[in-house]
């Protein structure tokens, strides 16, 4: 079995990493974080990713407590592995209270469990999902280097970290990728993360590049979110904040329409055109939404385009924090 779209533009996953499609796939939605998910539909979504040439898939042990990983493993078992570059993550210990562990024994145990679910003997990329402040980052880098030597992983990454953490880890063992939130409504990485990754030759993997669906082609109505939906208690989707955000989002919809494209494609193209080392991983539960991403690949941006979007969605435009108080535990603050 092979990928069906060899014309997918390629980007390198870190200086020492493989070439992968410019758009990756985030499998968090398979766990029901953004509404009820159907495993059978999830499998058809993975098939749609293969047909689109999307060969960099991202999951985590915490997504549905193994559900997302198991769906990917089932796909490989039933359909085959067409040469997917696979990433998974560990270190979050669900609560309450929520905790984090970068301990070598914990990461090894979680990694081995993930490999079983994924029907893999190794993964190409293994992230520390959050930094455990009780363990020096150099120690974590040494642990990851050990996993590489053992052949359990090809490279390692960090998630929701500060530029200083990247530099310290990279000095011990090269970091292949950093995964932080980045989109037109979350631009914090511009204050050091983008520059550090570019300098060190580290791939930057933006998650939620479509603003958790806020910049998708359908205008969201938070009143329809289920109580289990991650966004139902997220500050940007609740209270007066959503009303203010919606005004800007509708203006962006109108601009996309004036350009003859969709909000989804335009928002994703903006991320892709920010830098050649960015490999965004939008997520979805359906093949239909996945196919809405693809026009972004052929969309070229001029300085006028960036300026026009900046006028509609200026840096810092979003009302409300990107996480509520409980969700914000773990990401490193650096500004």
Image: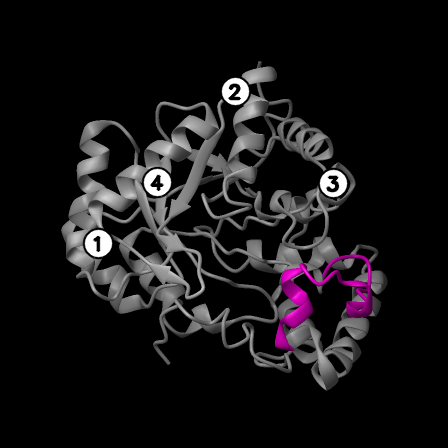
Spatial CA span between label 3 and label 1:
37 Å
Give x and y (percent) for residue 185: 61, 71
Say how many tags the image has: 4
- Which residue in the structure is indicated by mark 2? 81
Q: Look at 68% across and 80% down and name the residue there.
A: 311
Secondary structure of residue under mark 2: loop
Question: Closer to the N terminus: mark 1 or mark 2?
Answer: 2
- Which residue in the structure is indicated by mark 1? 170
Residue 301 visible? The answer is no
Spatial CA span between label 3 and label 4:
28 Å
- Which residue in the structure is indicated by mark 3? 286
Do the CB atoms of the residues marked 4 and 2 lie less than 8 Å apart? no
* Residue at the farthest front position: 96
Secondary structure of residue under mark 4: helix
Give x and y (percent) for residue 282: 60, 50
Do the CB atoms of the residues marked 3 and 4 lie less than 8 Å apart? no
Question: Closer to the N terminus: mark 3 or mark 4?
Answer: 4
Nearer the observer: mark 3 or 4; the answer is: 4
- Which residue in the structure is indicated by mark 4? 110
Spatial CA span between label 4 and label 1:
23 Å
Quarter of the figure that contains the N terminus:
top right
Do the CB atoms of the residues marked 4 and 1 lie less than 8 Å apart? no
């Amino acid at each position: 079995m092979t990928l069906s779209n060899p014309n997918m533009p390629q980007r390198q996953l870190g200086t020492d990493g493989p070439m992968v499609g410019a758009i990756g796939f985030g499998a968090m939605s398979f766990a029901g974080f953004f509404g009820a998910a159907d495993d059978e539909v999830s499998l058809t979504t993975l098939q749609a990713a293969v047909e689109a040439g999307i060969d960099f898939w991202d999951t985590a042990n915490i997504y549905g407590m193994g559900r997302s990983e198991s769906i990917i493993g089932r796909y490989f078992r039933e359909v085959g592995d067409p040469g997917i570059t696979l990433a998974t993550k560990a270190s979050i210990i669900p609560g309450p209270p929520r905790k984090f562990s970068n301990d070598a024994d914990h990461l090894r145990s979680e990694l081995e469990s993930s490999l079983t679910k994924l029907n893999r003997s190794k993964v190409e990329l293994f992230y520390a999902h959050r930094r455990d402040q009780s363990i020096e980052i150099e120690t974590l880098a040494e642990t990851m280097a050990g996993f590489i030597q053992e052949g359990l992983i090809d490279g390692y990454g960090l998630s929701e970290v500060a530029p200083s953490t990247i530099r310290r880890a990279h000095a011990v063992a090269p970091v292949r990728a950093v995964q932080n939130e980045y989109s037109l409504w979350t631009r914090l990485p511009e204050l050091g993360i983008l520059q550090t990754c570019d300098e060190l030759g580290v791939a930057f993997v933006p998650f939620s590049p479509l603003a958790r669906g806020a910049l998708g082609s359908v205008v969201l109505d938070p009143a329809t979110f289920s109580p289990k939906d991650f966004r139902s208690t997220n500050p940007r989707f609740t209270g007066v904040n959503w009303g203010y955000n919606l005004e800007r989002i509708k203006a962006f919809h109108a601009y996309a329409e004036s350009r003859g494209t969709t909000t989804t494609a335009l928002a994703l193209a903006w991320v892709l055109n920010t830098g050649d080392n960015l490999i965004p991983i939008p997520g979805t539960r359906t093949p239909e939404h996945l196919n809405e991403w693809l026009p972004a690949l052929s969309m070229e941006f001029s300085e006028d385009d960036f300026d026009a979007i900046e006028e509609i969605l200026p840096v810092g435009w979003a009302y409300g924090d990107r996480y509520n108080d409980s969700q914000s535990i773990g990401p490193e603050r650096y500004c």
